[in-house]
Amino acid sequence: MALLSAVAVSTAWAGDGVAQLRQFVAATPAAEGEFEQVVHSASGRRPQHAAGSFAFARPGLFRWVYEQPYRQLLVGDGERLWSWDVDLAQVTVRALGDALGSTPAAVLVGGSDIDSAFELAEGGQSEGLSWVVARPRQADSGFESMRLGLSGGQLRRMEMRDSFGQNTVIVFTRLQVVEAVDKSLFRFTPPPGVDVIGQ
């Protein structure tokens, strides 16, 4: 019986990526997990690989940690976006609203109305995923389009093409929906001795 139910659920989701995405946004107030990232440049140079962990709570709270190949921390505290490059001993800060807008990050930490930030269209089925094509409604979002791969109502993969022809692929190797995340993760104080650039 459980197997039949699982088949029924997977059949119901099949081919309807937009519905899965809307459900994911509506049903995921907070989550944490790990990711792997590959960036392909337009020039064809060697792809850049990275990996790390993340946590977020809607709206506007997130922590994105690059642990490989070098350490970088991005923290959204609801008002500001902090970016700490450990090797450069440099922190940049800007208003979070300006930084999010119709960017890919808005899928994870924006409000529940994803349609206000993106034009959504079905992207078909491949690699065992239902795909959504999302195009930003804001002209200055910094990227042209994004493909989102979902399975069972969960976001598994993001593929983004920016205005410079660079393609970024993020695979969520683990994404666990949680009731709440420790809010201290979303607070950031620049370490002593670092350069702080921005607001």
Image (cartoon, rainbow, N blue to C red):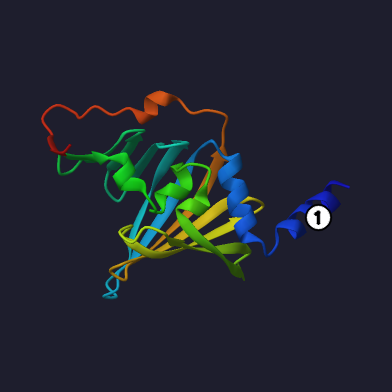
Q: Is residue 83 visible?
A: no
Residue found farthest to the right: 1
Q: Quadrant of residue 195?
A: top left
Q: Quadrant of residue 150?
A: bottom right
Q: Is residue 148 above or below residue 125?
A: above
Asked whether 86 or 117 is in front, the reply is: 117
Q: Is residue 58 above or below residue 164?
A: above
Asked whether 132 or 152 is in front, the reply is: 132
> Would residue 76 appear left or right of 24 to someone viewing this image?
left
- x then y, percent, for residue 14: 70, 62
Q: Say which residue appears at 33% left-offset and 27% top-offset.
A: 187
- x then y, percent, for residue 79: 32, 33
Q: Is residue 77 visible?
A: yes
Q: Amino acid at mark 1?
A: Ala
Q: Residues within 10 Å of mark 1 (few under 14, many from 20)?
A: few
Q: Secondary structure at mark 1?
A: helix
Q: Say which residue appears at 84% left-offset and 46% top-offset.
A: 2
Q: Say which residue appears at 45% left-offset and 43% top-offset.
A: 110
Q: Say which residue appears at 30% left-offset and 46% top-offset.
A: 99
> Would residue 193 appear left or right of 63 to someone viewing this image?
left
Q: Is residue 89 above or below residue 16?
A: above
Instruction: Find disc 1 in the rendering and name its residue.
Output: 8
- x then y, percent, for residue 114: 51, 50
Q: Quadrant of residue 199?
A: top left
